[in-house]
Image (cartoon, rainbow, N blue to C red):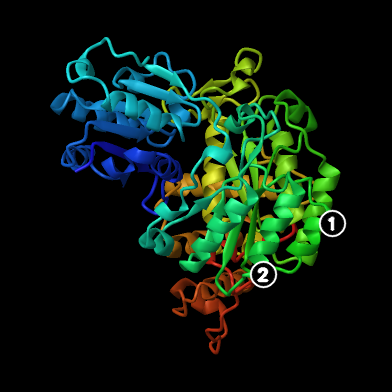
Amino acid sequence: MSEIILTTLNAKYIHAAFGLRYLYANLGSLQPRAGLVEFDINQRHLDIAEALLARNPKIIGFGIYIWNVTETLEVITAIRGVRPEIKIILGGPEVSYETEGQTIVQWADHVITGEADLKFAEVCRSLLELPAGAANSSGSQLPKIIAAELPDFSRIALPYEFYGDADLAHRIVYVEASRGCPFTCEFCLSSLDIPVRQVPLANFLGAMQKLLDRGLKQFKFVDRTFNLNVPTSKAILEFFLERYQPGHFYHFEMIPDRLPAELRSIIEKFPAGALQFEVGIQTFNPDVGSLISRRQNYERMADNFNFLRTQTRVHIHADLIIGLPGETLESFAAGFDRLIALGPQEIQVGILKRLRGTPLSRHDTAWQMIYRVQPTYEILQNRLLDFSLMQRLRRFAKYWDTIGNSGNFVQVTPLIWSVSPTVRVGDIPAVAEASPFYAFLRLSDWLYARLQRTDSIALMRLLELLFEYLTKEVLLDKKLVAETLWKDYQGGGRHDKPGFLKDYLPASEGGSNHRADSGLPKRQARRLPQPVK
């Protein structure tokens, strides 16, 4: 039994709640009276409520995010109906901005906005020390909306000891060496989090050593700008390089146009499978970048990509966003093709979301930005991309993730754009050179016409559809397509020859593994090919 329960609904079991562990670590003298329990959004709401009520708490603190606000509301309303005296405290990015009018806020006793690492304990202490009669009265001295002061990292207890052994073995473990972002990109909540603050380096590295000693192999850094402070970044990379063991893996979010020689010299030394850089490009259109207050040096970015692809073994995950104000279909297509040419192993095509609190809403009138009212607040249409076209692009993103990013089609992917279209297909133009974007959009339209869905597609069915499309629509040689698909199929460790390919494969074809970068995890094992000219 615990008087205070910290809880959240994670998107998946594999995600361990980083924020809750910070709150728990900083409860001070209240920690023995508290418990931390996690769920995921696929669990039944009443089962979650039952599990929380079984602990007989006086206070429940919920972490609220864009992915769980709807499901958490169901849990809270059930708890309110059964035990109305329990104090409900909300925190997290989804309730830190535009709190007025949010239904979930109306069901809470208190909402802590901002970074609640220290404030949560303060609020709990006040509630637990109230006289018996005052705890249920409307005369509580605490306001409903409580703004947390920006905490100084020197006062914050680090949370890493509260990752359990099962977390280290089976879940994503998040770490951070800094918070905040100096940039002002209008679609991003981090742009509201200024200034950038560093965790005291000695404390941070000491905590990382303890995680290594406990057997943790995969570290996911959530710093928005890991390479901003070069001396700190250098120290952290050197720390992990000196302690590297086979199987260690480190994920960092990087500023794409900042990679000085001090960092390059260290990055070059990491072996394959050790480093993944998430690089947020979002747009290659400088006018769009100016509209959303995003500054990028595309020339330096290209040079950094070239360095990473030719002189290191880093896996690059690059991001683009569909639906930004001012971005046309043509300019997004040009940006996608440009990114393909830079050669990242993974391109994440995201759909613009209007997150609460971000200044992106200032473009709503001029660019006729229309978003979903309910989470996840994705854009539905704007002045340049109508609803029908946005739906096509949404499907493009889904199919790209399934084909281009899955690692199942490393060698077959370039065949999709290996032949330039000679005639216009709908609004897909005939072009002089093969365009990866327009070629994949054509495939996306074709797949949706056949399937009428974008998910739950069996691998064998997708293989068969790709064979049909590439041989009948793109008119590629059947033997070439079959052999390429077979190599990709074997690359996943499979040796059962698909029946529809047998007539086009040599009878003696073996089962050797053709996957490039075989030391990498599956979703990191692809090399996104260059467009065929």
In what quadrant of the picture does the N terminus appear? top left
Q: Residues within 10 Å of mark 1 (few under 14, many from 20)?
A: few
The span from disc 2 to disc 1 (Cα, nearest Å) is 19 Å
Q: In this image, 102 relative to 388: left or right? A: left
Tell me which numbered mark, 2 or 1, is placed earlier along the sequence: 2
Q: Residue at x 67, y 43 (%)?
A: 225
- Residue 1 vs 362, above or below: the answer is below
Residue 344 visible in the displayed image: no
Q: In this image, 327 relative to 207: left or right? A: right
Residue 110 image-quadrant placement: top left
Q: Mark 1 is on which residue type?
A: Ala
- Residue 495 vs 214, above or below: the answer is below
Disc ID at residue 261: 1
Near-viewer residue (69 or 462): 69
Q: In this image, 363 relative to 25: left or right? A: right
Q: Residues within 10 Å of mark 2 (few under 14, many from 20)?
A: few
Residue situated furthest left in the rendering: 82
Q: Mark 2 is on which residue type?
A: Glu
Residue situated furthest top in the rendering: 139
Q: Nearer the viewer, mark 2 or mark 1?
A: 2
Q: Residue at x 69, y 55 (%)?
A: 417
Near-viewer residue (323 or 81): 81
What is the x, y in percent for residue 272? 66, 70
Near-viewer residue (510 or 311): 311
What is the x, y in percent for residue 74? 26, 30
Residue that badge 2 annotates: 242
Q: In this image, 64 relative to 226: left or right? A: left
In what quadrant of the picture does the C terminus appear? bottom right
